[in-house]
Amino acid sequence: MKLRGNTLVIGLQWGDEAKGKITDILSEQADVVVRFLGGSNAGHTVVTGGQTFKLHLIPSGIIHPNVLCVIAGGVVLDPEIFELELNDLVAGHIKFDGRLKISQTAHVVFPYHKLEDQLKENSLGDGKIGTTARGIGPCYTDKATRTQAIRVCDLFHLEQLDAKVRDIVNYKNRLFLALYNSPGVNADEMVRKAHRYGEILRPFVCDTTELLQDAMAADKRLVFEGAQGTLLDVDHGTFPYVTSSNASACGVSAGSGVPAKAIRTFLGVAKAYTTRVGTGPCPTEQINAAGDRIRERGHEYGTTTGRPRRCGWFDAFATRYSVRLGGIDKVALMLLDVLSGFDKLLICTGYRYRGQMLRSFPTDGEVMKEVEPVYEEHPGWAEEIDQVKSFDQLPANAQSYVRRLEQLIEAPVAIVSVGPDRAQTLMREETI
């Protein structure tokens, strides 16, 4: 595959679409890989040479020795998770000296964010959002309210840092006690952690916006690695069961500081079926033998949380919405091998709401609670396909399944994945 120009890799479902594998493959020809949103609630798995790397913050391109990896300002950064990932990379003999940069304007996740996440979620009872409890939402909340926020650059202004951390902890602890009857966190410990965070991050910090703009001016090839998925976008997803950032293609400019017009290819990633972690609508979920079979064959357990994912048939109605919203040029269809062995497959082509077919995907949470998926049936295939080397070698029914999905989502499938390893990837187009 030839990589031409800058490429965005974005999830088209509720996250966990195997974006890490696609980013890893594209990184072979990229100069720069950029993570531009979310935090350690993301989980990108890369399998190569018999090694498995599970990355939550560091871009998947780090596995490639000549790629510069950037954590941009739209990310909320947990320095403790970041340090663990660095240690894992060292243990895996991955060298990253000078190849990893962090934006000075990224916001920092502290332990009080994680505590706030847990306390609030537990207080919701049956109305839980399904958060990963990594402190992502509370950190983005502080970013929006500004006065309780700490950015990476703040960690290096020590005279102001201590007082700022103590003021925030005092405010948070009063809130925790009043709302949740929790004593909160220790201010001295948070100050020590803030100093430690500065030590961890200092070697990697720079103005990443200028760095990326200079890279584009030098005709470098950039790959932008999305996190979560379009249907979890805070503005355009299945609100309120969404993440706290713009996880659709709409978020790339704000998160990275790079204008959208600089991106040549918008590549959407979708599984050949549907999964979701946590609560919220998932109209095609199968709480039956079919769902269990998909879960076990696909090893559908969260990279970040370990929670079993809810599994169901491919939702073409929702995926087409994501394609249109993101201006998606091409699609990577992942985990097609998981569907081998089914006599028949179902594809959701639309939703029925109170007896009427919906013309557009509903982002109204109350409507989503009541929608009924409308299915069409497609013949399955018995053959295992994880060793297939080209699209033409797939069983006829597998090929026609992919072609039918292309029709329904209104975008060409350029890549088909039939296993977790790089080699188990079928390229239908020469360039991306």
Image (spheres, rainbow, N blue to C red):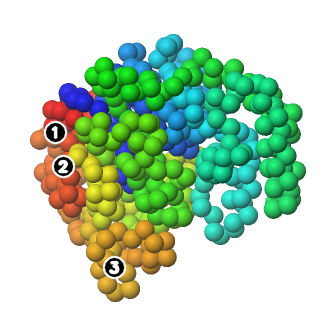
Coordinates of residue 73 in the picture (x, y in percent): 52, 36
Coordinates of residue 172 in the picture (x, y in percent): 80, 50
Q: Quadrant of residue 102?
A: top right
Task: Give the residue displayed 39% in from the left and 50% down from the top.
Answer: 250
Coordinates of residue 259 in the picture (x, y in percent): 36, 39
Could you tell me if residue 65 is visible in this image? yes
Q: Quadrant of residue 343?
A: bottom left
Cα separation, mark 1 vs mark 3, equals 34 Å
Cα separation, mark 2 vs mark 3, equals 26 Å
From what the image shows, is residue 211 above or below residue 430?
above
| The N terminus sits in image quarter | top left
Q: Which residue is mark 2?
A: 412
Q: Amino acid at mark 2?
A: Pro
Local crowd size for mark 1, using a 10 Å CA cut-off: few (<14), some (14–19), many (≥20): some
Q: Which residue is mark 1?
A: 428
Task: Give the residue displayed 46% in from the left and 64% down from the top.
Answer: 238
Q: Residue furthest bottom?
A: 355
Local crowd size for mark 2, using a 10 Å CA cut-off: few (<14), some (14–19), many (≥20): some
Instruction: Between residue 353 and residue 328, name the one nearer to us.
Output: 328
Q: Which residue is mark 3?
A: 352
Q: Amino acid at mark 1?
A: Arg
Q: Secondary structure at mark 1?
A: loop
Q: Amino acid at mark 3?
A: Arg
Cα separation, mark 1 vs mark 2, equals 9 Å
Q: Secondary structure at mark 2?
A: loop
Q: What mark, if any, has residue 162 been given in the picture?
A: none
